[in-house]
Amino acid sequence: MRDNPISPTIDYAANGVQHGYLRLPYSRNDSAWGSIQIPITQVKNGDGPTALLTGANHGDEYEGPLALVELAATLRPEDVTGTVIIIPFMNHPAFLAGTRVSPIDAVNMNRAFPGQPDGTPTQKIADYFQRMLLPMADVVLDFHSGGRTLDFIPFAACHALDDPEHQARCRAARDAFNAPFSIEMREIDALGMYDDAVEAQGKTFVTTEIGGGGTATPYTAEIARKGVRNLLIHAGILGGEMALAPTRVLSQDDDTCFHFTNYNGLVDFAVTLGQSVKKGDLIARIWDTAYTGLAPRQFHALMDGVLTARHHPGLVQAGDCLAVLATEIHA
């Protein structure tokens, strides 16, 4: 097995607070012996569970990084039982560029797992997580939001898993995060996802989609901040009481959740995020942008459900995901 070229500037075995980098050698035209330096913080206090917290798996998603840079600046060893590893900018080159995928190699971090130690920079980062960081973790939180091309209701999510005990752990952790919505998800494109890499190692895993549009708001950032602390309390790493509020529980378990457009144009949504629709209800119209006087294309719900995601911004292209529905689960 090839060794990964990434080296940490912190000592994972040491107690206390450490701020440093995951340093990846990266020779390029403007720096022959240069490197990519991914910021990392570890807060450790003796034996106990280990939480691995990541943001900016995609570089245009900001709620996770906001929550995690604040946590890295404020969390103290005396508050912790065990270890918290904080990586606010998992795909640091993409984060600095404000892009979904890396500007260096055009690789989507969340489709690069298990990675390659001798691959592109993104594949090397994925391999380091796969073989070095994930084996140390008991619970993993990977923040996502809609980025520049999607807008979501704010939810925490787990996946449907084959092992009932594993499923129960992930569901309980998702519920502890306590976003306004909690979803059991079906992924549209799961091959190479970080999620699958985490779950394949039996780790307790929570992910999110919080807002979107390539920005964050005070409301969505606070959901992320509250959620990460709740999860650490749930894991037994932080003390105190979780801040809990009512949450709506949804399920995405069918391909009919996803609505795609075959047309380019100006999108005109008929429903808002979080709104319930019936099968056949109008979701959106798409107006032609090359000629006036034409009737719009109409898109109707393929199922009963709640609108959980929509395309952003206002222009769509053929093949875009226009909208996503989920089924509400009533207790």
Image (cartoon, grey):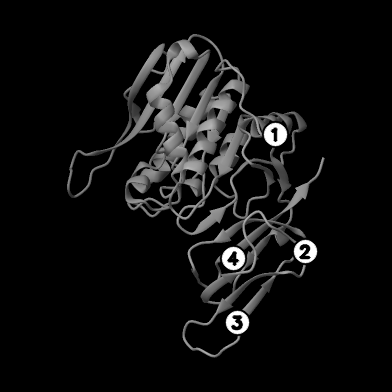
Q: Residues within 10 Å of mark 1 (few under 14, many from 20)?
A: many
Q: Secondary structure at mark 2?
A: loop
* Sequence order check, earlier mark of 4 and 1: 1
- Tell me how far mark 1 sits from mark 2, CA to CA: 27 Å
Q: Are marks 4 and 1 in contact (CB under 8 Å)?
A: no
- Give the residue displayed 22% in from the left and 47% down from the top: 28
Q: Residues within 10 Å of mark 3 (few under 14, many from 20)?
A: some
Say above or below: 319 vs 327: below
Kindly identify which residue carries mark 2.
Answer: 278
Kindly identify which residue carries mark 1.
Answer: 171
- Tell me how far mark 3 sits from mark 1, CA to CA: 41 Å
Residue closest to the eye, 264 or 201: 264
Say above or below: 204 vs 265: above
Measured from the top left, where is residue 22 in percent x and y? 35, 31
- Tell me how far mark 4 sits from mark 1, CA to CA: 28 Å
Residue type at mark 2: give it.
Lys
Marker count (numbered):
4
* Sequence order check, earlier mark of 3 and 2: 2
Measured from the top left, where is residue 148 in percent x and y? 45, 56
Residue closest to the eye, 77 or 195: 77
Residue type at mark 4: give it.
Leu
Measured from the top left, where is residue 330 in percent x and y? 81, 44
Kindly identify which residue carries mark 4.
Answer: 322
Quadrant assignment, res 307: bottom right
